Amino acid sequence: MKQLVTVILVFAVAFNLAGQITRHQRLQERQNEGSILMLNFSYGGQVPGADLATRFGSNYLAGVNIDYYTAKNWIFGIQGDFLFGNKVKTDVIAPLRGSEGFVYADDGGFADVQLRERGLAFSGHFGKVIPISDRNQRSGIRLTVGAGMLRHKIRIQDEPQVFVSSLDKEYKKGYDRLANGFALTEFIGYQHIANNRLVNFTIGVELYQGFTQGRRSFNFDTKMPGLEKRFDLLYGYRLSWTLPLFIGENADEINY
């Protein structure tokens, strides 16, 4: 009796493994047919140009975008990025510094005030993936163009333990050089959507052209309006990890 139970269990495990292997082979043979809804998590680095280069050094980005990838390899998507960096070339709080180079707190001590770059970018884009291999028609050279908004400012980061009345919340606006405006963006790189749907990523270079304008009516350090028109450039790389949602030919067929 025990031997019969053992044999039945062995056959059950064997049939289960055979079924899993067959399903896996069928999945590979499907070649990623149909449309795909892709959630992309991005990280990258950028170098500024034009007017932006006079204010900031290189920066990093972290972002999320959602793409609709058609069966014919056309891409339509939206994208949002957070920009951050530590290199600020304009010391906007120089008038607040003493002869030693420190900002004095209201209690007479020194306040450790740091300047940082912060920004946001939002855009919609469209483009196409050009396959480079017959073995995988959903992977290849990715080309997209887009338009949206670019926003950046100087973050004035002070110590929470000390208080500088000249850098209170509202007064910081007189130093932060806030600017925003319309922006264009272009991307060229490689997109990989694996046949087995396990490894999916994009890597490439990206360009931003921002037609921005200063949004502060008065800068405290220069004693002048901060409403100048600007031309801001960003050049950089982007690496994205993709979570795909496969939409089959039938309306009720959705696969992860």
Image: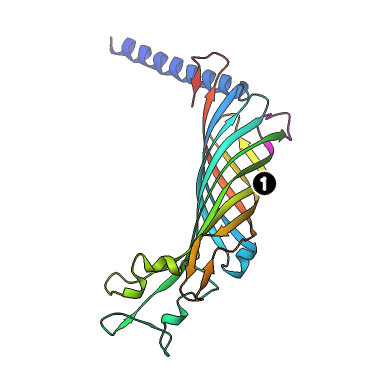
What colour-coding does the image apply?
rainbow
In the picture, measured across the screen, residue 141 lies left or right of residue 7, that is right
Residue closer to the observer: 58 or 103: 103
* The magenta segment: 131-142
Give amino acid for label 1: Glu
Read off the residue under disc 1.
Answer: 186
Does 172 sit above or below residue 184?
A: below
Q: Point out residue 237 in the picture as x, y percentages from the top left corner.
A: 62, 53
Q: Point out residue 13 in the picture as x, y percentages from the top left corner.
A: 41, 18
Magenta stretch contains residue 84 = no
Residue closer to the observer: 98 or 79: 98
In the picture, measured across the screen, residue 150 lies left or right of residue 157, that is right
Does 238 sit above or below residue 49?
A: above
Exactly how many numbered labels are in the figure?
A: 1
Give the image quarter of residue 194: top right
Q: Residue furthest bottom?
A: 99
